[in-house]
Image: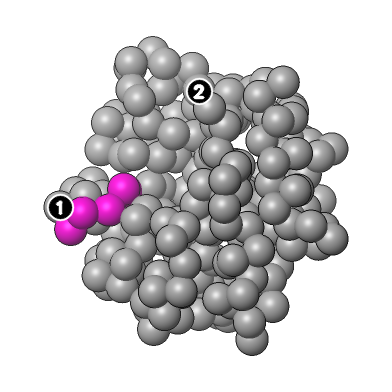
Amino acid sequence: MAQINPSILSADFARLAEEARRVEGADGADWLHVDVMDNHFVPNLTLGTPVVESLGRATDIPLDCHLMIEEPDRWAPAYVEAGAGSVTFHAEAAAAPVRLAREIRAKGARASMALKPATPIEPYEDLLPELDMLLVMTVEPGFGGQAFLDIMLPKIRRTRQLIDKHGLQMWLQVDGGVSAATIERCAEAGADVFVAGSAVYGAEDPAAAVRALRRQAAA
Ligand code: DX5
Ligand code: ZN
C-alpha cells in the first residue's frame, strides 16, 4: 500500500500543529515528513530537535525526519530521542552508516538512508539489510517546490530490483517534485513511500490531496 508523507517544509512554520492536523484523519498522512537542514549540507536552515519534540506532542501522525545535515553520526540519535519514528541520514554525510543505522534502530526508530541525485545506489547494496528505508532524492535537496528529476527514474528502478533481489521488506521512498503529474511514474518504477510538500500544502484541501495522491500511486 502506497504511503503518502506530506512535507511540512511547505507548511506555515508559525502554525505547525495546525498544519499537521490538516493532514490527519482517516486516509490522511501516513507519516509527517520533517526536513531538517543545517545551512552546511544544504544551503537552507529549518529546525532541530526542540521543534521535532513539540511537533510530536502536537500530532498523532508519526514523524519521518529527513536529516539534510553534516555529521549525522553525531546528531541523528537525538532525533530518535526527540520522538521521530523514522530517521533518514544522507549517505554523502555519514562517516559510518552501518554503525549509525544500528544505533538508530537500537534506540527504537526506523533507520533510513538518503541518496542525492548524483549518488549511485550500487556501492550501498550490501548495506540494504541494515536499513528500514532507502530514500532516492528526485531533486537536489534544500528546497521545496523544485521540478521533479525524471533522470532519477532508472535509479528508483535499480534500487527496487536490489531490494527484491535480497528479499528485503524495506521501503523505497522518493522525495522532491512528487505530485499528481509525477507520482505514477515513481510508483511504476518501484517506489512505495512518497514525500509531497508543495503538492499537499499548496492544495486548497491538503487531506484531499493526500488521498488523491495515494489513489494515483496505487493505480
Ligand atoms: C527537499 C526536501 C523535500 C521537500 C519536498 O530538499 O527534502 O522533502 O519538502 O518538497 P516538494 O514536494 O515541494 O518538492
Ligand atoms: Zn525531505
* Residue 110 is a magenta residue: yes
* Residue beneath disc 2: 160
User: In the rendered image, is residue 133 in sight?
Assistant: yes
Q: Is residue 195 above or below residue 69?
A: above
Which callout, 1 or 2, points at the residue further toward the start of the chain?
1
The image position of residue 28, as x and y in percent, is: 60, 48
In the image, 205 versus 51, the foreground residue is 205
In the image, 91 versus 107, the foreground residue is 107
User: In the rendered image, is residue 48 in sight?
Assistant: no
The image position of residue 125, as x and y in percent, is: 36, 29
Q: Which SS type dominates the magenta stretch?
A: loop
The residue at 58%/67% (across/down) is: 20
Dot 2 lies on which element?
helix
Q: Quadrant of the C terminus?
A: top right
The image position of residue 108, as x and y in percent, is: 21, 54
Q: Is residue 198 above or below residue 162?
A: below
* Residue beneath disc 1: 106
* Residue closest to the far front: 26
Where does the magenta region start and end? 107-111
What amino acid is found at the position of numbered circle 1 in the picture? Ala
The residue at 31%/48% (across/down) is: 110
